[in-house]
Amino acid sequence: MSHSDSIRAGGRRSRRGWLAAAIGGTVLLATVVVGGALPGSAGASSAGKPGTKATGTPIIVGEDWDSTSASAAFTDVTGKTLQLAINQLNNTGGVLGHPIQLVIANDESDPTKTPAVTQQLASEGAQFILFNTGTDATAKPIIEKLGIPSIGVTDVIPTFAVAPDNSYTYLLSSPLSDWASVYCGAWKKTGVKTIGVLRDDSTTTASLDNILFPALRKCVKIVDVETASGTTSDVTAQVARLKSHNPNAVLVADLGGSFEILAQESVHQFMPTTPRYSLATIVNEPATWSLATPGSLNGVISMGSLNPTNPQTVKLKAFLAQHDGASYPMTAFDADAWDAVQLMKTAMVKAGGGNDPAKTNAQMQAITNYLASFGQPGYNLTYSATKHAGATGLCGLVLQQFGSNNKPTKAFAKYQPSCKTS
């Protein structure tokens, strides 16, 4: 078993044995050489021939990986697949013969720490930064000053990719504005006119809600918003207040993990006939599904982005199965991580190498029609000098519904976004 495979098999505990952490306000950095291009995937041809291991001078890439806060529920999956993708890249020729050397730091999704983490990654020689955290937006001014191209790997808040200070910042996930359009489409189709919200008290969730809620209010009335600590073990009072408002549906908004399970179970218990919706958290956190009481997730409709008929999704799923076993439940975080590395690699190769951030940045803006590992078949990511968010329409999203086995078993039959809508 390779080093990366042992990390993936061991989960969070094995990773923390070596991963950098922010302790006592001091950011510690861990450096590992890891590296990817999926054979047959979009952009794979530039990585080199299979079996041609990169041996040139390493290109240093920074990763801000929050492994310790509540955000770790999704950054765990993202971080492991980023490593796997870079390992694969290094084993198939790297970037024009040069391997990627990954330098990892942890801002704990604390917006006050993100700029310092970014500066330290740059001090370690990072020529590109992958943000695997919930607070990348606060790093924009320092990224602009440093001139280092950066991707918010799973970020759905548009702020990171829009002015000001966005000359070097990019996104690939579908933005919250698209989420709102999909939710509204589903609610219009199913007759939902009022919703109640149960959310955690995290900074990341608050940032999401500040953008998502105004858009949702254009199609439904939010009759109640209940907030609870992300570490609580009881949301009975919050659910009781939600129930008193008699909403047509309930949206659970949080960072996932144990809070999401608690929230969904409680709503299921006290409001059993009320339709339940979720953000793109629980559907992408398979480790949490077994925590739920049998049948308590049945019917939950979650924002997702994987379509099993997308050829790029099929290829990535097969590749992941080779490393994690046939039963490995691929998530959108895997797809985001994989595509982020492929986009970075494509830009570096077209720039003639990865050690000139300005040239790499210019080539990031020249990437068009990159076939994504998520979304409906044919969904692509496109960038330009004025478009730093790669999303190209609503069909980067898929509403997924949980079955009685507490797993997402099917696409929501009553509504799916049209690829002709943007």
Image (tube, grey):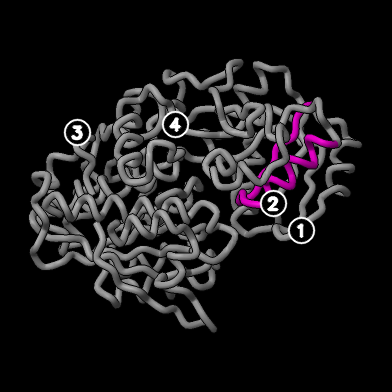
Labels 3 & 2 near each other (Cβ < 8 A): no
Single out the residue that lies furthest toward the front. Answer: 1
Mark 3 residue element? loop
Q: What's the residue type where badge 4 is placed?
A: Leu
Residue count near mark 1 (Cα–Cα under 10 Å), binned few <14, some 14–19, many ≥20: few
The residue wearing badge 3 is 40
Q: Position of residue 397 (x, y in %)?
A: 48, 30
Q: Between 339 and 361, which is closer to the camera in this rendering?
A: 339
Sequence-first tag of 3 and 2: 3
x and y percent of residue 266 in the render? 80, 42
Where residue 85 appears, as percent x and y from the top left, is: 28, 50
Q: Which residue is mark 1?
A: 232
Q: Are marks 1 and 2 in contact (CB under 8 Å)?
A: yes
388 versus 150 height, above or below: above
Magenta run includes residue 63? no
Q: Which residue lies at the image location 59% right of the left edge and 42% below the top edge? A: 282
Instruction: Quote the CA–CA distance across marks 3 and 2.
Output: 39 Å
- What kind of residue is marked 3? Gly
Q: Which residue is mark 2?
A: 259
Inspect the image, locate mark 1, and give the three-letter code of the amino acid beneath it: Thr
Mark closer to the chain start, 1 or 2: 1
User: Residue at horizontal 18%, vertical 55%?
Assistant: 90
Nearer the N terminus, badge 2 or badge 4? 2
Q: Amino acid at mark 2?
A: Phe
Q: CA distance from mark 3 to mark 4?
A: 19 Å
Q: Residues within 10 Å of mark 4 (few under 14, many from 20)?
A: many
